[in-house]
């Protein structure tokens, strides 16, 4: 089976999740950092490669990746996160299993047209919660076995 990727439209998720929206209203960077933490845990729990994309942060596309962490892209000025997501799915959709997390219906249609799958912001919340529960069950099972 080919590698699995989850590409997340950062601001679409931040504005759809009430807890992140509240953080964003106080300080944008706090909401971004919290989403990075949530998605890093998801990647750790599931083995799915996570790519998080935000709208513009300067004259060129920038990428931040810490060892063992998720990839975070910021679009260049005059470009949107949607542009980057579309390019990634168009380029890699035929080689990898790609799911795009966004509540933007047009973005979902475009991703599907390029061979990707989609989940809404609520669907992403469910994936994250399911991964946490599954991880907790596995830890509990292993602790029992170790006794």
Image: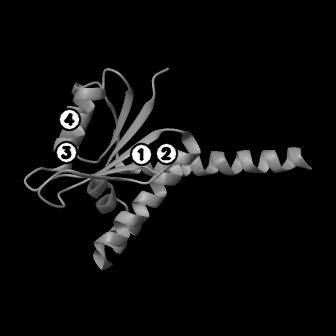
Q: From the top left corner, tell me how far across and down residue 61 is, in percent.
A: 19, 50
Of circles 2 and 4, the one toward us is 4
CB under 8 Å between discs 3 and 4: no
Secondary element type, mark 1: helix
Looking at the image, tell me whether mark 3 or mark 1 is earlier in sequence order. 3
Of circles 3 and 4, the one toward us is 4
Q: CA distance from mark 3 to mark 4?
A: 9 Å
Q: Residue at x 15, y 60 (%)?
A: 58
Q: CA distance from mark 3 to mark 2?
A: 21 Å
Specify whether 132 is left or right of 101: right
Q: CA distance from mark 2 to mark 4?
A: 24 Å
Q: Residue at x 30, y 27 (%)?
A: 92
CB under 8 Å between discs 1 and 4: no
Look at mark 1 in the image and give the residue it sits on: 123
Looking at the image, tell me whether mark 2 or mark 4 is earlier in sequence order. 4
Secondary element type, mark 4: helix
CB under 8 Å between discs 2 and 1: yes
Q: Residue at x 65, y 47 (%)?
A: 135
Look at mark 4 in the image and give the residue it sits on: 87
Q: CA distance from mark 1 to mark 4?
A: 23 Å
Vertical relation: 139 (above or below) 98: below
Look at mark 3 in the image and give the residue it sits on: 82
Residue 90 visible here: yes
Secondary element type, mark 3: helix
For label 1, the crowd category at 10 Å Cα-Cα, with few meaning under 14, some 14 to 19 and many 20 or more, is some
Q: CA distance from mark 2 to mark 1?
A: 6 Å
Look at mark 2 in the image and give the residue it sits on: 127
């Amino acid at each position: 089976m080919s590698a699995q990727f989850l590409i997340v439209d950062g601001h679409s998720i931040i504005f759809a999740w009430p807890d992140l929206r509240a953080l964003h209203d106080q300080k944008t960077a706090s909401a971004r950092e919290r989403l990075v933490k949530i998605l890093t845990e998801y990647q750790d729990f599931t083995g799915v490669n996570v790519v998080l994309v935000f709208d513009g942060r300067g004259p060129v596309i920038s990428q931040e990746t810490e060892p063992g962490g998720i990839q975070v892209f910021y679009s260049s000025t005059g470009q949107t996160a949607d542009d980057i997501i579309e390019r990634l799915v168009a380029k890699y959709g035929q080689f990898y299993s790609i799911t795009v997390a966004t509540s933007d219906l047009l973005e979902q249609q475009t991703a599907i047209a390029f061979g990707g799958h989609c989940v809404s912001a609520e669907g992403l919340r469910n994936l994250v919660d399911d991964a946490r529960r599954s991880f907790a069950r596995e830890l509990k099972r292993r602790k029992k076995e170790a006794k």
